[in-house]
């Protein structure tokens, strides 16, 4: 945005806007999809003129959720009942059971006697939900800039400038009373490494593997000890029968995930209340105690499957699956037709190399910083003693008093305040209802302040457009 446009936006006139809405969601993954569902169901029940108008911005050209890890046969680690709606409203038309009924597979799914659909099926469920909101999502666009709209010194709204991913010159402006940032995660790579033709992150595993499926293969190296790493090793071993697969990690072996009933209570909606109220030292203790429910752990059945495979190959004398524990990756070199992994044994100190078709980094993700999008508005957001965003129980960012418009954060950026489920699917349904309720409460408070009643208030309290 030019300086002239930015200055105009701060005084309320701004660039020509394509639409005024009550909520702009940045990112349209499962979190903001769940919010779209909650808002849609509120709108279906509210009186005339009380609907919440929404618009979402998503850089992908179509809805997609971890497409690179939609590996055949992999299952969800979360119950289908923790879909985008059931725990908020079991009667919702967006539940996984409604999806199964619509697809004609309800009886077939029940006969599986499992709570855990395949990842491919759950992704199809997400696509089924997302299809209802195509008219509200700007696919292939990024939120490039957010500028405040001021009236009498108070920030009453935001102008969100979006750009086409394909053509940065193609822009659109949205004015909104509320902003919900849900921009997900970015791949984390080991120090000194970068994604390249033969250095992959699991985010892109399936797409990259399919692209080289026709050629002869020598070896793949998979770095990491968590669920994605184990799934990647199993997938490559199965799909490339001519290749050796080396699973490299600093632990002695894969560690099983704790999915026992009492430990699973950490994923309950009520656990978010407990975590939010707890002192910082208790929060940290809870994250430490229950890290083995989610972080760097593997489903027990998959561990046993991999062990059986390695043992049976040892018996047969053809060891294609090599589990290399207590081993660290120290460097990766790109080669014309592959990569060279430089490794070091932690127990002996011995260094050695493995030439391979690709090194697959199953090294996790880093949350994006929501403040990067806000520009100067970031200075209006309050932080705690550790420089972390202060986030209300309703997921609204605490700001200075002059900011009356709402900024909400979903995802890992709220992990320090809301706990382990912030970046997971487990509480999406309930969280989306909480944010929707917060939007309605904010509207009611504005109606009282402005003297508006239900009959004459515009949607969500209206989005004021101050005179230039």
Image (cartoon, rainbow, N blue to C red):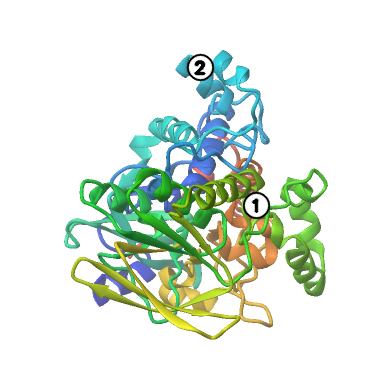
259 up-or-down from 184: above or below: above
Residue 58: image x %, image y %?
36, 51
Viewer-closest of 24 and 9: 24
Outermost residue toward the bottom?
349
Viewer-closest of 40 and 48: 40
Q: Is residue 130 left or right of residue 298?
A: left
Q: Is residue 392 left or right of residue 358?
A: right
45 up-or-down from 411: above or below: above
- Res. 426 image quadrant: top right
Viewer-closest of 339 and 90: 339
Residue 352: image x %, image y %?
42, 79
Tag 2 and tag 1, C-beta contact below 8 Å: no
Q: Residue at x 64, y 50 (%)?
A: 438
Q: Quadrant of the N terminus?
A: bottom left
Q: Give the label, 2 or 1, closer to the camera.
A: 2
49 up-or-down from 63: above or below: above
Is residue 456 shown to the viewer in this render?
no
448 up-or-down from 347: above or below: above
Q: Quadrant of the C terminus?
A: bottom left
Q: Which mark is residue 105?
A: 2
Q: Is residue 56 left or right of residue 231?
A: left
Residue holding disc 1: 445
Q: Residue at x 70, y 59 (%)?
A: 292
Q: Secondary structure at mark 1?
A: helix
Q: Earlier in the sequence, mark 2 or mark 1?
A: 2
Is residue 429 shown to the viewer in this render?
yes
């Amino acid at each position: 945005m030019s300086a002239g446009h930015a200055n105009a936006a701060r005084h309320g006139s701004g660039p020509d806007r394509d639409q005024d809405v009550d909520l702009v969601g940045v990112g349209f993954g499962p979190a903001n999809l769940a919010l779209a569902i909650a808002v849609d169901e509120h709108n279906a029940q509210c009186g005339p003129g009380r609907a919440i108008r929404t618009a979402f911005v998503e850089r992908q050209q179509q809805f997609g959720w971890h497409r690179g890890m939609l590996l055949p046969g992999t299952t969800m680690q979360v119950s289908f009942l923790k879909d985008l709606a059931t725990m908020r409203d079991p009667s919702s038309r967006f539940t996984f059971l409604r999806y199964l009924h619509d697809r004609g597979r309800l009886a077939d799914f029940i006969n599986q006697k499992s709570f855990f659909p395949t990842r491919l099926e759950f992704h199809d469920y997400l696509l089924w939900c997302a299809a209802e909101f195509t008219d509200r999502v700007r696919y292939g666009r990024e939120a490039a800039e957010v500028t405040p709209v001021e009236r009498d010194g108070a920030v009453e709204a935001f102008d969100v400038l979006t750009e086409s991913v394909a053509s940065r010159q193609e822009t659109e402006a949205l004015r909104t009373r509320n902003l919900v940032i849900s921009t997900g995660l970015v791949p984390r790579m080991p120090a000194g490494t970068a994604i390249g033709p033969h250095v992959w992150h699991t985010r892109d595993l399936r797409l990259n593997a399919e692209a080289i499926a026709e050629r002869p293969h020598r070896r793949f190296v998979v770095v990491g000890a968590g669920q994605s790493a184990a799934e990647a090793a199993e997938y490559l071993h199965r799909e490339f029968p001519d290749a050796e697969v080396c699973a490299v990690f600093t632990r002695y072996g894969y560690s099983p995930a704790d999915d026992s009933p009492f430990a699973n209570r950490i994923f309950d909606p009520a656990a978010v209340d407990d975590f939010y109220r707890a002192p910082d030292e208790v929060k940290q203790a809870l994250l430490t105690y229950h890290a083995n429910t989610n972080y760097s752990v593997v489903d027990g059945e998959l561990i046993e499957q991999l062990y059986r495979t390695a043992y049976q190959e040892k018996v047969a004398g053809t060891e294609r699956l090599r589990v290399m524990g207590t081993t660290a990756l120290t460097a990766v070199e790109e080669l014309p037709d592959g990569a060279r992994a430089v490794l070091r044994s932690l127990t002996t100190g011995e260094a050695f190399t493995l030439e391979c078709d690709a090194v697959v980094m199953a090294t996790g993700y880093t949350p994006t910083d929501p403040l990067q999008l806000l520009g100067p508005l970031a200075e209006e957001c309050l932080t705690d003693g550790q420089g972390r965003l202060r986030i209300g129980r309703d997921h609204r960012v605490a700001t200075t008093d002059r900011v009356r418009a709402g900024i909400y954060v979903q995802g890992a950026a709220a992990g320090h305040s809301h706990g382990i489920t912030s970046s997971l699917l487990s509480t999406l349904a309930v969280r989306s209802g909480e944010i929707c309720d917060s939007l309605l409460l904010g509207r009611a408070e504005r109606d009282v302040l402005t003297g508006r009643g239900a009959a004459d208030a515009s949607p969500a309290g209206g989005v004021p457009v101050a005179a230039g």
